[in-house]
Image (cartoon, rainbow, N blue to C red):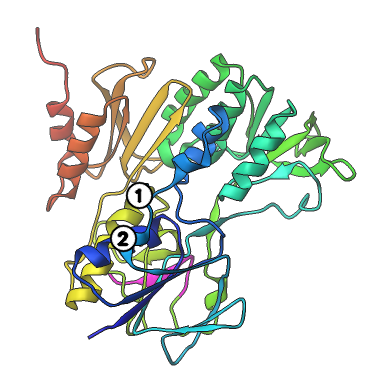
Amino acid sequence: MLDHVAVVGASLAGLRFVEALRREGFEGRITVIGAEDELPYDRPPLSKQFLVDDWDEEKLALARNGVEALDAEWKLGVAATALDPTATRLTLADRSTVEADAIVLATGARARQLPFGRDLGGVLALRTLDDARRLRAALADGPRVVVVGAGFIGMEVAASCRQKGLDVTVVEPLPAPLIRGLGPVLGERVARTHRDEGVVFRLGVGVDGFEGEGDVTGVRLSDGETIPAELVIVGVGAAPATEWLDGAGLEIDNGVLCDATGATARENVFALGDCARWENERYPERPRFEHWTSAVEQSDVVAKRIVHGEAEPFAPVPYVWTDQFHLRIAIAGEIQEDDEMQVCLGDVEDDQFLALFGREGRLAGAVGFKRPRQLNGLRRKMAEPGGISFADAIAEHAPKDG
């Protein structure tokens, strides 16, 4: 019987796990350790409503009615620095220790940095609430903005900055934005909306460095051009926050390796969320899903495993969404560059359509532009044993005669 569970990470995954643990009937002690000073907050609005609409920070709270009902001890503003390789004991940055019967790792990920420009003012990333505070303050000065990286965060920030009336340039070495999430055709479709709204793109080119002394004044591209800028937002991906686990006896490779219930190589140590890579029979490469939905769903599985000693192997179809200008886009599954694409229920030039992606005769992914009902239905069918064939998915979503 476990009497004390320690959770490292006080954001979405950590909070949802604590809630799930209580729902499953755990009545013991829970300690939650968080490197940030904040109680759990929602990250998706940081790149959107928090910047554009100047949301009050209270709106970001994930536990709107407070965390008191969870009866947990919250150790905030103090990071875990080590996990004992022979015991379920944590060392914290203030040199205190926490020993528990089980430890759940939910430390998330950190924004990747470029190898230059870290000492320049006006070069920012966006991952935490503190990052968002700094970015919102910088936008108030009306700077010329360059966004480095055209992934989801970069494109959302670019849209938000443009909605604030700022000059925005996006730099991306790939030929279109969002290729890794949407593929080249839909990535270019999103780019067209951004261009219509006034965003400038420099695609197929990298960044060699930044100009400026003290504060950034420009971005130097690999083709020799320099783009003037008073604010640079670096959005080049995220790395799992696992460096503090060196020597802890865990298998780590771009995240903590877990089985399909979140259990690690060490007894009574579990991991979930952005810092973890779970076995998944649908995806043998064991990808690390950096998705809000994934963190929530995994929390339920780990809570069941801890309370009941077992849980059904979890093999989800990933799901993620993004809002940019008037576009509302949701993605189910994993899209690869060579997948076959078929557009249904609209046209790619519209703001409302469904795109299906096939691989080896099966539906591998789906993208809905303002098509939530159809997208969610396809996600459920992809999660069924054997999934759904690409041909059947197309037939089900073809326009009906008349």
| SS state under label 1 | loop
Instruction: Kindly indicate the quadrant of the structure image that contains residue 335.
Output: top left
Q: Report how far apart the C-alphas of labels 2 and 1 lie in the structure.
A: 9 Å
The residue stretch that appears in magenta: 252-260
From this view, report whether residue 210 is shown above or below residue 372.
Answer: below
Residue placed at 78% from the left, 49% from the top? 117
Q: Which mark is residue 102?
A: none
Taking the view exactly as shown, the residue that stands out farthest to the bottom is 86
* Image position of 336 (left or right of 301): right
The residue identified by callout 2 is 69
The residue drawn where x is 47% and y is 46% is 43
* Other-residue count near label 2 (Cα within 10 Å), few / some / many at <14 / 14–19 / ≥20: few
Residue closest to the far right: 213
Q: Nearer the viewer, residue 72 or 311?
A: 72
- Say which quarter of the image contains residue 269: bottom left
Task: Please name whichever residue, 199 or 282, is drawn nearer the observer in this view of the structure.
Answer: 199
Q: Position of residue 371 (x, y in %)?
A: 27, 26
For the N terminus, the quadrant is bottom left
Q: Main secondary structure of the magenta part?
A: loop
Q: Secondary structure at mark 2?
A: helix
What's the residue at 31%, 70% (across, down)? 262
Q: Position of residue 124 (x, y in %)?
A: 69, 45
Q: Do the numbered discs 2 and 1 sit on residues whose CB atoms are within 8 Å?
A: yes
Label for residue 65? 1
Q: Position of residue 209 (x, y in %)?
A: 79, 45
